[in-house]
Image: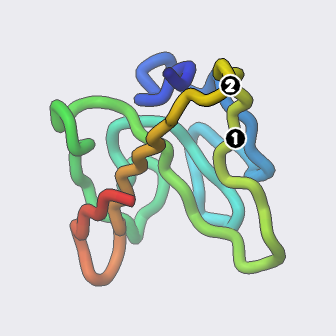
Amino acid sequence: MATNGNFSAGNTGFLTAYTYNATSIWNEGTYAVGPNPSAVHPNFGSWGDHTTGTGNYMLVNGSTGGNKILWRQIVSFPPGVQVTVKWWMLTFVTPPHIVKRL
């Protein structure tokens, strides 16, 4: 399993090429970890995560330049093991509150 895959431990356990800012993700290519998008960007709504509604998630203002690694973690598995990776994504702006499972 991923380390801190639900971000309950905050900004730890993963690598990213984005810039961490705990108080503002106004600039493109920045991110924060927390339970409320509007706390770090004035144009983002306020929605809970898809599990409890009060948990942390990675709050991102996407980068427009190049291919930047958003989230990365290296995990070793025995040969032949089949692995399933699941992501949940929420749009903070128009259209609001669209939850997608990738």
The crowding category of the residue bearing disc 1, from other C-alpha atoms within 10 Å (few below 14, some 14 to 19, many at least 20), is: few
Position in image of residue 78 (x %, y %):
66, 19
Disc 2 and disc 1: Cα gap in Å? 21 Å
| Disc number placed over residue 92 in the picture, else none | none
Image quadrant for the C terminus? bottom left
Query: Which circle's residue, 2 or 1, is located before the other in the chain?
Result: 1
Q: Secondary structure at mark 2?
A: loop
Up the image or down, 66 lies above or below 20; here it is below
Q: Is residue 86 left or right of residue 48?
A: right
Comparing labels 2 and 1, the label whose residue is closer to the camera: 2
Disc 1 residue type?
Arg
Residue at image point 56% right, 20% down: 3
In this rendering, the answer to whether 57 lies above or below 19 is above
Q: Amino acid at mark 2?
A: Pro
Q: Name the foreground residue: 45 vs 75.
A: 75
- Percent position (x, y) of residue 43? 40, 70
In the picture, measured across the screen, residue 102 lies left or right of residue 50, that is right
Which x, y percent locates residue 7?
46, 28
Is 70 left or right of 53, judged from the image as shown?
right
Q: Position of residue 62 (x, y in %)?
A: 61, 68
Task: Assess disc 2: are there few (<14), some (14-19) or many (≥20) residues with their C-alpha within 10 Å of its C-alpha.
Answer: few
Which residue in the protein does label 2 denote? 79
How is the rendered protein coloured? rainbow
Pointer 1: what residue? Answer: 72
Q: Residue at x 43, y 36 (%)?
A: 34
- Residue, x 29% and y 63% (percent of image)? 100
For residue 6, side relative to residue 60 (left or right): left
Q: Give residue 69's quadrant in the image.
A: bottom right
Q: Residue at coordinates 34% horizontally, 37% vertically from top-left?
A: 35
